[in-house]
Each structure stands twice: as structure tokens, then as C-alpha cells.
Amino acid sequence: MNNLQKFTTQIRSRLVLLILINNLLFIADWLIMEEVFQLTGYWFFLGLLIVPVLTLTLLPWLSTSYLVQPTKLIWQAVLHIAPDTSNVPAPDLKKARLGKDLVESLVSHVYQLASVAEDVAKTATKEQANLDHDFVANSIPLPLVILDKDDTIVFANQAAAQYIRHERQDLLGQSIYSVIDMAFTNQQTFDVWLKDAKAHKAVASQTWERVKLNLPDTELSKQPQFDLAAYYNRNNPDGHETMLVLFDHTNQYAQDDQSMSFVALAVHELRTPLTLLRGYIEAFEDELAGKVDPELEDFMKKMAVAAAQLSTFVNTILNVSRIENDQLSIQLHRESWQDILRSVVDTMHARAEVRGIQLSLEMPDKLPAVGVDRTSITEVLNNLIDNAIKYSGSSNKIIIKTYINNDGQVETTVQDFGVGIPDSATTHIFEKFYRNHRNRAQVGGTGLGLYLAKVMVGAHGGHIWVRSKEGEGTTFGFTVMPYSQLAADSKTSDNGSVEIVRNAHGWIKNHSMYRR
Amino acid sequence: MDTHTTPATSPIGKKILCIEDEHFISELYVRALTRAGYDVTVEVDGQRGLELAQTNQYDIVLLDLMIPSITGIEVLRHLRNPAETPKLKAKVIITTNLEQRDDIREDIEKQADGYIVKAEITPHELVALVDSIR
């Protein structure tokens, strides 16, 4: 009210001042006409009229623009916050010539009201989407957690709270990373994926298998294990940006682990004798080549192939065991994909030949350098080709192709023309220990090769797929990243001045660091 | 791995010290490397291997990690210490079968010139890798 009184007084005093000035002007005019110009009669009255005419035109114009200006500023403030006229700029309150305090206080009230209105609207939508009142979300036995844009938990159902051993109300408002410690089997983890999705995608989803929960005060072997599904939806109107669903598989995975660690232990002991066996077979081949009965030479070749196959098997088992124990580490380096493919096809050639199968390799002249762990990705290729050989049936051709796909990734396919896989099986084929039951009797295998391939490819930031038709054959495909993209993403690089020569299972540095 | 690549330099007369206590492995390596033209010496003991490497001018040292008296990683550290081994010309290639602890792996990556997993490599492939050393 004070401001209003001040404003009224200001207007009143200014009006009085104006009228006073006006009257003074009139008197001055009278005096000037009479004394200075000494006008009389007709001319005197005409001269006297100048002031009223001037004041009648100027005074209303001046006084209204002066008096209306504060109203204009307030009007502008209202339009500024009104929903449909947001292009109106905020009023500049320094411009207020009259009743500055009143204008300032009124405008600030306008703004306050607007923010109250906004809050009310927000609360209304929140109320609408409140999952706490959702019977289904709350009573579904699947652990379900929802995060907002800052990865803060905005909802967790009872099952989730129980699963991660927290009180439900304690979870709300916490960062997901501070309450759940998850161990993934590959480098593409939830936080990395989410960060990537936030940077590049509006909507994304991904599933991880065999995620381990690290609960405090719990033995490693008793930690819950689950498959984790994550769905991301940027700018979800309810603020529910990410949804996590946990599918518990603790019993199943723990059992697998137990049998795996025993097998791994046993298999580890096979490594040295197997290495020696392969070495001595190689020595035999060296010494006897061209000197013995061709049949014996053929036997020798078959022995070498069998030993190499056994070696792949041993490596597969050990790698799966490393994955289970979170010990698999891969290091991505700049490599020539053509080199890797050629060297794999060279080694696998003998294996295919024994079965009367021809391997053909089709690749473009130019491919970007890729970022891969040579040992691991070689095993993926070995496994896929080995698989194609096993399931080729009576067909005698396997085609390995590589090209740049639409996403700019280097994609490689291994195609056989054998028995194929029924539709019902393709969805499970990358699961651990999964094998197509109908073929189990005829074809050997661990049921681990494709699982390993999937994990390894995933760890490289790529994906693996299968397409198959029964009786016509199967195509497996997977992607790896161009090194340039990987380097931009993670800044992994070799020391630039050092050339590193690799084959599948070793490396040599060529540099002059230790030489003088 | 293509085993018929032309060596970067001719291996004729290049001297290799193979510190390895597993007899069968060293037998296979010596045979393959000798056939490829290298002059190979075998030593089974870590301490004696270190002394040999320090007093003789080898071109390449193949160093197993699990060896008697002192371990391969200790041999590597002594060889890379300029105070103890002032003028080492040899390239040191680790040959092993075991997973390494992180600190050891870091040392190997920094100080060794090569790393070979014995169980995953045949003698021919070893020769190809050794041939690639300049």
C-alpha cells in the first residue's frame, strides 16, 4: 500500500506541477504580449491563444505517455510469462520513470504467481504418473527401478528393495550408483551404456546377461546373479528417463559357475602337454614332409588338426571361466582387419580341408584399421568358422565376407550352406551351454563357443547376430569398431613411436628405447 | 600365422638365450630356432640366466617367468636397471603360461620387448615372431 500511496502522491504532485507551469506560462505569455510586443486588440488575443493551443496539444500527450508507462511495464511482464506469448521480452524495470517501487513490486508479484502456477501444473502431472499408487508396478515380483535424468532413483518397487537389501523409502532420491554395485562380464557396463545413450540416442534399450550384484558381507559365490534389462527414453514427460528390470538367475548361474571352475581347473592342466604335443607334431611334419607315404603324411595333418581343435577347446573353456570370474581383460589395439582375417583363414584352412570344405574370403581392398584385442577376436572368428565347419553337413563351401555396414562399423559374416538352425533355436543360440538338441548327438561341442563369441564381441563394443534357414544354411555376423572411432571414444592408443608386431598369441615391440 | 614370412633381418648368427626350465619346451624352441638359423643357448636357472645375459652379448633373451632361484620378472628388472646392466643390447621376450597380476603385467608392458603365451603358440609361430624383431 505504501508504494501505491507514493505513486499517487507522485502523480498528484506532478500534475499540480504541470498545471502550475501551464498557468505561469499563460501569465508570462500575457506579459510578453502586453509589455514586450505591446500588442493590442485583435492581435493581443491571437497572441494570447498560443499558450492554450500549445498546452492543449502537448500536455495530454506528455502526461498520458508519462502516466501510462508504469502500466505498460506491468502489462509487458504479464505477457512475458503468459504461455502463448513467450516471445515478448521481459520488461526493463530501470526504464520506469514514475512509481519505480510500485512497478518493481507488482512485476515481482506477477513472476511469483507464474512460478506458483507452474509448480501446480508440475505437481499435477507428477501426481498423475506416480508409480507409488500403481498396484501393478508395486506388486510385480520382478525388481524394477526407475531413474530420472540425473540417474537418481525416483521409483523402486518392493521386489527391487528386497533384492538389493535396502529399505524402499531409503532408495528414493539416491543415485543408482551409490546403492547398487553391479559387476558386469564385459566392458560395456550400465553406466558406460547409459552415458553413451544420453549423448547419442533419444531411445535405447539393452540387456546384459550374468550381471553380479556385489552385496556387502556376502561371499562371492553367494552374490545374486541376474540378467539386467535397461530402457532409456530421453525427456520422458514424467521424468522417468531410465527403467531397469532385473531377472534373477542366481541358482542357475551359480551352478554353472561351480561346474565351470572345476572344468577350468582340470582343463588348465591340459595346456602344457597339449602345447608339447602340437610342437612335436609340428616337428614331425617338418622332418617327414615329402619323405614318407602320402597316407602317413595325411595322418600327420589330421593329428595336427585334431590337436589344434583341442587347443581351441581348451582356450574356450579357460576364457569362459575367466569371464565368470571377472578376470577377462581385453586390450583394444590398432590392427589391420585384413591381416587378422587372412591369418585366421590360413590357420582354419587345414581344419576345413580335412572335412573337404573350401574356405573363401571376400574383402574389399580398403578397410579402416580396427580397434580389437587380437587374441580374443581371433578366437571369435575361430569359433564361428569352427561352427560353420561342424554344421556344414554335406555342403563343401564356407564364405567369409567383410565390409563396412551402414553404421560405419566393420562387419564380418561367416556363411555356411549346411543344416541350418530352426527358428525356435536362433533366439537362444548365444546362451551359455545352449545347443540345438537335435544335433547334439551328431555334432560335438561345448555349447560355449557362441556364448564366448557374444561376450567377446560385446567387450569390443560390437554386436553379433545370426540368420538361418533350415536346410539352407546359417550366417553369423558381427561388428568391430574402426580404430579411429574407438580412439575418439576412449583414447586408447599404443605409444605412437613404437611399432608392435603381433600374431594371435604374442607381441613384439620394435623400438630403440633400450639401445644406445 | 603365416610361417613363411621373410625375416626383417637375416637371423644367421643371431644369438638367443633361452631361459626356460621346462625341458620339452626348450627342446622344441631350440630345434625350431636353430633350423631357422639362430644360435641358441639354454639356461634353466634364473640367477645363472641373468649372469649369462649380463656378461654375453645376446640379441634376444627368451625369458620364462616361473624358473628356479630367481623369477623371470626379477631377471627382467635386473636387466632393465642401467646401474646393474649398463649396456644391454638384447631384446627381452617374456614367455609364460600364467595370467599375470596387474603390477607384474604393467612391468612387462613397460620393460619387456615382447610377450608370448607358450600354451597358445607353436614353435613355428615362435620363430615367426622372433623373426619379426628388428
Image: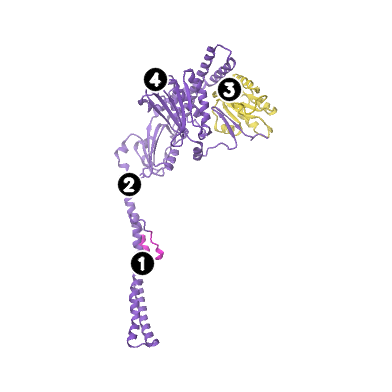
Chain colours: A purple, B yellow
Residues tagged 3 and 2 counted as in contact (Cβ below 8 A): no
The quarter holding residue A440 reads top left
The reply to whether label 1 and label 4 mark residues of one chain is yes
Q: Which residue is mark 1?
A: A69
Disc ID at residue A448:
none
Q: Between marks 3 and 1, how big is the CA–CA gap?
A: 94 Å
Q: Which residue is mark 3?
A: B124
Q: Which residue is mark 4?
A: A439
Q: Which residue is mark 2?
A: A126
Amino acid under disc 4: Asn
The quarter holding residue B29 reads top right
Residues tagged 4 and 3 counted as in contact (Cβ below 8 A): no
Amino acid under disc 3: His
Q: Between marks 4 and 3, how big is the CA–CA gap?
A: 36 Å
Residue at far front of view: A365
What is the chain identity of the residue bearing mark 4? Answer: A
Whether residue A78 is situated above or below residue A350 in the rendered picture: below
Q: Nearer the viewer, residue A73 or A243?
A: A73
What is the chain identity of the residue bearing mark 3? Answer: B
Q: Between marks 2 and 4, how big is the CA–CA gap?
A: 55 Å
Please name which of the two marks, 3 or 1, marks the residue nearer to the observer: 3
Amino acid under disc 2: Lys
Is residue A219 at least partly visible in the picture?
no
| Quarter that holds the N terminus of chain A | bottom left
Amino acid under disc 1: Gln
Q: Between marks 1 and 4, how big is the CA–CA gap?
A: 89 Å
Helix, strand or loop status at disc 4: helix
| Quarter that holds the C terminus of chain A | top right
Q: Earlier in the sequence, mark 2 or mark 4?
A: 2
In the rendering, at what x and y percent does residue A331 appear? 52, 33
